Image (cartoon, rainbow, N blue to C red):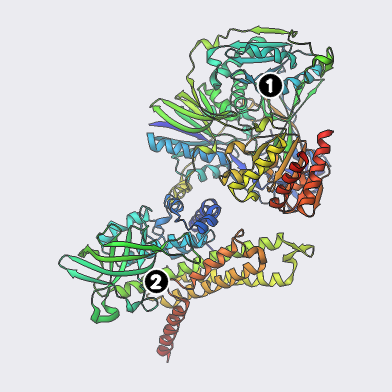
Amino acid sequence: MDYLLTEEQQMLRDLARQITNERIKPIRAELDEEETFPWDIMNDLAQADLCGTVIPEEYGGLGLGCLENVLVLEALAMGCVGVATTYAASFLGAYPLLLYGSEDQKQKYLPPIAKGEALAAFALTEAQAGSDAGAIQATAVKDGDFYVLNGAKQWITNAGEAEIYTVIAVTDRVKGARGASALVLEKSDPGVSFGKKEKKMGIRASTTREMILEEARIPRDRLISKEGMGFIVTMKTLDNARPGAGALAVGLAQEALDEAAAFAKERHQFGVPIIHFQAVQHLLADMATKVEAARALVYAVARYIDTRPKDYTKVAAMSKLFPTDMAMQVTVDAVQVMGGHGYMREYPVEKMMRDAKILQIYEGTNQIMRNIIGLALNKEYSKKK
Amino acid sequence: MLKIIVCIKQVPETQDVRLDPVTHTLKREGIKSIINPFDLYAVEEALRVKEAQGGKVTLLTMGPPQAEEALREALGYGPDAAVLLSDRAFAGADTWATALTLGRAIEKLGGADLIFTGKQAIDGDTAQVGPMLAAILNIPFVAWARKLTFTDNNRLQVERMMDHGYDAVEVELPALITVVKEINEPRMPSFKAKLKAKKEPIPVWGLNDLGFQPEQVGLAGSFTQVVKVFPPPARGQSETWEGPAPELAARLWQRLKEMGRS
Amino acid sequence: MSLIFYAEKCTACGQCVDVCPFGILRLEGGALSIAEGCNLCGACVEVCEPEALALPEEESPSPRPEVPPDGVWVFAEQRHGELAPVALELLGEASRLAGTLQAPVAAVLLGDKVDHLAPALLTGGAQKVYLAEHPLLAEFLEESYAAALTELAQKFQPEIILAGATYAGRAFIPRVAAALKTGLTADCTAFAIDPEKRLLLQTRPAFGGNIMATIITPRTYPQMATARPGVFKALKPASSGEAGSITGQRPVPLNNLVAGEIIRVELESLKTSPQSRFIKTVAEIKERVPLGAAEVIVCGGRGLKEAKNIKLLEELADLLGGAVGATRGAVDAGWIPYAHQIGQTGKTVAPKLYIAVGLSGAAQHLVGMQSSDFIVAINKDPHAPIFQVADMGLVGDLFDIVPALIQEIKKDKG
């Protein structure tokens, strides 16, 4: 379908597809099998200027919007969601700075991210604080011109590989959620270390580790915005990232559909290609319809966000919820279309099915997405009465 | 400041070309034009030399007006400038007439210290234009390079591929080098360079710009002439066997032995 | 000059659109349109039944010069005093062509201390050997070799020059052709003579082997071509038991007292020092049996799945006294060095027996092996294109069939 993309947007998407086809697809099975961090591909993305899509030009980026971001993410997810997650997680780490950073912080941290010289990461989750972000335990205590951080952040994408971390920690225990603050940490800061590499079901090219803070002493000017803004910084960061998660789902599901449909045309049973059977056609028809519906939603929300509306929390949640649930169904069906072949690691769809699952979980589980949407509806309809 | 010129060619993506087994016609639905894949290695090597030694990389191609697309695409990898040689009179050029035209354009560009080409183009597979161009410009050249090292500002050590292995040869600049794909891994294009490439003015030089007479170039200026094009000869009727592996293996070996005796 | 189109004869059948290798012909609303980029290859003219398409008459800007006196030359490639097999293959072919032309055959031998090779060239079909020995020719160097052959050709005026399409041949022969201002056809797989016009008809594959083209050099001399190793047949040298027998076009003399002339030439062109120099051989490719010379090749593709399975091919190749080849896919995967690559971007081979194992048969691979005498394909996908060119196809898992075949051969050979 034609989504009326500008020439520049098509160019950007085609460039990301070129990286997918030439660099990611040839090695995605190996990256998955060996759980290798995709540094070569990150360097390719840097070379292509894609590490700075949403970072303003004055900080060395391309200064593009949410729609361009989702176009790139969709294209990369057609190659490998593990790689695309690594790439997207860097933006997740950069958003707090982009949205709330001081001029000095932006000058210092955004250019290396935009040029792809440094990866970023976002450190929110803890052992006891997942969906309940208000329950975080990590602390940042002011000590003269410094903050001293203690605690452990769990399942941090890019941990250990990234140079720049935005960390959410409690600066005032008494204030609850309003007592959390966002701070920038560098990999080389004293007291920063990383735990073991997690063994995951999918997205195995991406790195997920614990980030351990032991008396991590950092200058005061690492605080992003003001004390107590941590929760708001987090919510806004996730609002901006969620269409991206939806885009990963669309790219992944499209690729699964492409694989399944191509297989169905080649695979002969009872003397004909199996795509001739209605049972298979109907599966493929549902898959294709869902992919297109999800894509339309993601693009529409991204375009809406690019108009800089005041509040887009609800639609951002929708743009993550629907596509990621869709990707799970479509990848399961892709395996079904391909039967025994689909289940074998020799074919790429079993990996896609494993990769799809995380999309329903990370950046806010889909249950939390429904909560967010439900809450927004409750508010909207109270106003209307 | 090295003056580096890379000669590239726009070719049909022959990987997708399939021969219809029955009719022996080319099935080429939706075949698009691409930059000859080997030329991307030449572009990359030129960029690496520029990054290491300083210089300017200029792309040069001869082709129909749409070959401009190939130049713009190649500019996306980072070269500084491009020139298109296009004229109806250039059409149908063989390798000699192509090399002659490229050579004149290089002279018009003020010559070059280093000229790169891919080892061959995937449509014609002749690998002749590079060496002929070197002859026309009367500069030394090395074919099938897989590694370049500057021994001083004016001297290049080249490792080149041969039937027996790899040789190292030294060559004085100006020189022409044709590269094999072992030489490097081409980078990805950059978005900023692509944006710039879109707007970059690309001069188009024709017959008069290069001071040729029509009979010197194109088909008229070619020394060779295609007289016939036909599908490759069909192979003999093939047999296909299916069945348990040991049985297939036994039958095959039996057959090979019979052949060996005949 | 452009393609001639007689619109009134056109039936809009679309045949020409299908065959145009450049995709520049299009049927729009029943009318044929010809876009720019036609190089007058003539593919459309061949298929146009109503003769609505025609090639422009060649306007010959200069009349063809007089036929040069020195017949058919073969560049006798050697390295370190060892002849490349293609040299004798081309002498065989040259003898055949020279028979039609009633012209002599000469070999050109360049090198340093290589005169011991001359007798083999004379028994191989040459009546004359031009021998140029010089330290600068000890190792192959584009510049020196091109200068040497150019000088010889200018001096002795051959009608035709053939050379092997080896790495060396394809590197320096174009330079010679350009210096002599004559045409050159690369990588030919067949030659013939148009006896009336004394034209060398040079046939070669193009477009990744999907079409064959016959090319002539109508206006200039010498007519030059490089030819694929392994395609042409060397003359069978007479053995002692068949003294006086005739092979090929001409009598082959007995033993070492070969008839024919060895002409030593002092080259002027090597007296000036070249702008390039040979330093050293960095690495020799060690093949158990060189691919180019192997009578049996076992070639594997991506179907092998892992580097270690190359062993399976090696075992089979050893049993058959052959060499191992690989597709680009297997080479790109890093399972086997590039030197083993067969196909458009690798080597071209034409063994007696070619066993294709776990490779689908992409057009670019087929180009490199389809002139093999007998092709066996082993692949589990019955629709794989390799079966289209195979003389014998075995549908099944290579990991079952190849070990079974190895067993079978071992059993048989005891």
In this figure, which residue is indicated by the disc labeled 1? C87
Q: Is residue A282 left or right of residue C150?
A: right
Query: In the shown orientation, is residue A274 left or right of residue B176?
Result: right
Residue A168 position, x and y percent, is 31, 70
Q: Which residue is drawn at 45% across and 39% down?
A: B81
Residue A221, disc = none
Q: In which quadrant will I find the N terminus of chain C? A: top right
Task: Please name the residue shown 37% across and 72% down the image.
Answer: A125
Residue C343 appears in view: no
Label 1: chain letter: C
* Mark 1 surroundings within 10 Å by alpha-carbon count, few (fewer than 14), some (14 through 19), many (20 or more): many
- State whether discs 1 and 2 lie on one chain: no
- Is residue C219 rendered to the left or right of residue B97? right
Q: How far apart are marks 1 and 2 (CA)?
A: 71 Å
Q: Which of B50 and A310 is in front in this view?
A: B50
Circle 1 SS class: helix
Residue C305: x, y in percent? 61, 51
Q: Nearer the viewer, residue C324 or C86?
A: C324
Q: Which amino acid does label 1 sit on?
A: Ala
Residue B261: which quarter of the image?
Answer: top right
Residue that label 2 marks: A238
Visible in this render: residue A77? Answer: yes
Depicted A9 relative to depicted B118: above or below: below
Q: Nearer the viewer, residue B231 or A44?
A: A44
